Amino acid sequence: MSNVDYLVSIVIATHNRSKYAIPCIESLLSIGSSEIQVVVHDTSNDVCELAAWAGQSADSRLIYVHWADRLSMTENHERALKLATGEYICLIGDDDTVSSYIIDIANYAKKQNIKMLTPKVKAAYYWPDFRTKNYGAAHAGRI
């Protein structure tokens, strides 16, 4: 990351999950702060409603990249992270969102010279439609 253009970059890697990613991105952009950047790296090979939706977005805070070749989940996340230009980076799933308080917390962290924040709460997830190339549905019920 060479330039810091935003206080917070919220980064999302996605694949064939437009029905989740679009509401996720809409919720992030609805925060309305000019200090937030939303970065999406998409490896979808389906109809990809997300690409069409992102192409119609006039919000300059949204960075959307569609990568036609299949990448591993790790590669997709790494490419997404490289696009971020925020001082702080928040990596979320394509069906998640953040509170608008993220700006207040990031400003507090910056003033206190805190480089990284992490929650004490551990979340459990259930993804009934999650499949991977190597493990199929083996990870559908856990993270």
Image: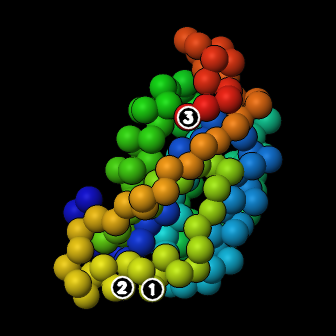
As displayed, is residue 122 above or below residue 7?
A: above
Q: Amino acid at mark 1?
A: Asp
Q: Amino acid at mark 2?
A: Asn
Q: Residue at x 39, y 50 (%)?
A: 81
> How far is the residue under mark 2 from the one under mark 1?
5 Å
Which residue is outermost to the left?
113
Q: Position of residue 70 (x, y in %)?
A: 54, 24
Are the residues at dot 2 and dot 1 in contact (C-beta closer than 8 Å)? yes
Given residues 106 and 32, the one toward you in this image is 106
As displayed, is residue 136 above or below residue 34?
A: above
> How far is the residue under mark 3 from the one under mark 1?
29 Å
Marks 3 and 1, the one that precedes in the sequence: 1
What label sits on residue 107 in the rendered view?
Answer: 2
Q: Residue at x 42, y 32 (%)?
A: 75
Q: Which residue is mark 1?
A: 104
In this picture, residue 39 sits left or right of residue 8? right
